[in-house]
Image (cartoon, rainbow, N blue to C red):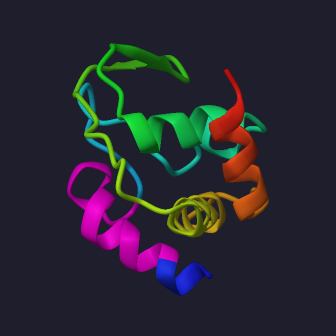
Amino acid sequence: DLAKGKKIYETRCLVCHQPDGGGVPNMNAPLDGSSNVVGNNIARLVKIIKGGYSEKIALDGYYYNNVMTANPDLKDEDIANVLSYIRTSWSNKASKVTVAQVQAAKNKK
């Protein structure tokens, strides 16, 4: 549900990743046009949303080092919705994410 995903994005992600998904240079990675976001590693995206991220990250030739807060309270459906919204918004044209993909990602070691 893209409308629910947009609402989650607006309340949890927008402050750091910006309304246009562009992020903040050297701090918060962009989501628009990001190879990680539109790539096939759904498990990585799920783990970052659930557990947060605190390491410096190199992404598409740039470095970002702001801590991303964990979201352990988000349900699988919420994660699927927000990832689907992000992966299909702005210039992103990736596939939507299903609840089954989120569940499989959580079970990966």
Q: Is residue 104 left or right of residue 57?
A: right
Residue 101: image x %, image y %? 76, 51
In this rendering, is residue 83 above or below 68? below
In this rendering, is residue 80 above or below 57? below
Residue 63: image x %, image y %? 37, 17
Residue 29: image x %, image y %? 38, 35
Q: Nearer the viewer, residue 24 or 45?
A: 45
User: Which residues, given as a range, are shown in magenta?
Assistant: 5-20
Q: Nearer the viewer, residue 109 or 55?
A: 109
Report if residue 35 is visible in the image. Answer: no
Residue 108: image quadrant is top right
Residue 18: image quadrant is bottom left
Q: Nearer the viewer, residue 94 or 26?
A: 94
Taking the spot 49% from the left edge, 82% from the top edge, the residue there is 4
Please tell me whether residue 8 belongs to the stretch shown in magenta: yes
Taking the spot 38% from the left edge, 66% from the top edge, the residue there is 9
